[in-house]
Amino acid sequence: MGDVVAVIHARGGSVRVPLKNIRPLCGRPLIAWSIKAALASCCDRVIVSTDHAQIASIARECGADVPFVRPADISRDVASELVTQHAIEFHERERGAEVDIAFTIQPTTPFLTAADIDATISMLRNDTALDSVFTAGPIHERPEWMFHRDEMGRARKYIAGVIQGDSGVSQALPELWHPNGGGYATRREVLFADNLIVGRSAGIHRMSDLASVDIDNEIDFLIAETVARHLGFA
């Protein structure tokens, strides 16, 4: 069985929250939360892919490997698979052997735990029909109730049909989940042959809505601080 290598994406160019990945959350740099979880998991190596010297320094202090500076051409807003592919290729050249699974982590989902990582990887390893597994949280804003505006400003249903009867009762609608950004376990061949992190035959590891907090804006830090205390992380 080949290695499982975790790749934490942590570029320095966050626009909405400058240097978001090392912004303190309950007194710890945001990226430290993901590194701690990954190091305690079954992953054989934890690599942080960054283009920023301060992020690299903090990541090393937290125990992660930062064996390269992320190239400029993948340090912009680019597809996540390119970043993971680069890190895995570097690892394989260095070690002289191919990995089995790449585990992509976005540090903006700080309540991802080692248990979540292990469960995600285990699901992929135990089900040969799956090519990937991702962590997900429950949705609350139903797509069946969403609209877009046409050029005249009129409301148009995003999903065809009317809101009537059971279609207007959330409890009567099917359970839906969204990728929460925490982690993505991907078989090597899918990552490179298909250029996908979430493949065409994916599984879901479910996390709670609280644990699925994804930090994107300033208000998300306030929410995350409250959730961290509620979950006993702070």
Image (cartoon, rainbow, N blue to C red):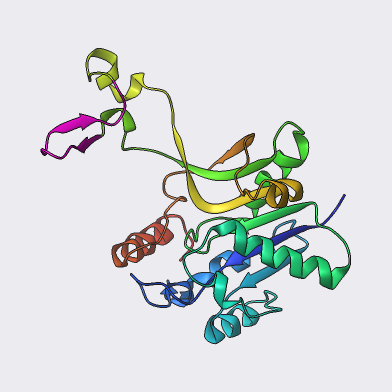
Left/right placement of residue 89 relative to residue 71 reads right
- Is 61 above or below relative to 132? below
Left/right placement of residue 182 relative to residue 222 reads right
Q: Position of residue 125 (x, y in %)?
A: 77, 41
- Tally of marks: 0
Left/right placement of residue 152 relative to residue 21 reads left
Q: Residue furthest front?
A: 151
| Magenta residues, start to end | 147-160
Q: Judge whether residue 37 can be spotted in this image.
A: no
The residue drawn where x is 46% and y is 65% is 77
Residue in front for this viewpoint, 209 or 12: 12
Q: Quadrant of residue 18?
A: bottom left
Q: Position of residue 142 (x, y in %)?
A: 32, 33
> Where is the C terminus found, in terms of image quarters?
bottom left
Residue 157 falls within the magenta-colored stretch: yes
Q: Judge whether residue 183 can be spotted in this image.
A: yes
Residue in front for this viewpoint, 170 or 208: 170
- Is 110 above or below relative to 193? below
Residue in front for this viewpoint, 23 or 14: 14
The residue drawn where x is 63% and y is 41% is 199
Q: Quadrant of residue 221?
A: bottom left
Residue in front for this viewpoint, 160 or 54: 160
Left/right placement of residue 152 relative to residue 2 reads left
Residue 215 falls within the magenta-colored stretch: no
Q: Quadrant of residue 182?
A: bottom right
The residue drawn where x is 47% and y is 72% is 21
The residue drawn where x is 44% and y is 32% is 176
Q: Position of residue 179 (x, y in %)?
A: 49, 45
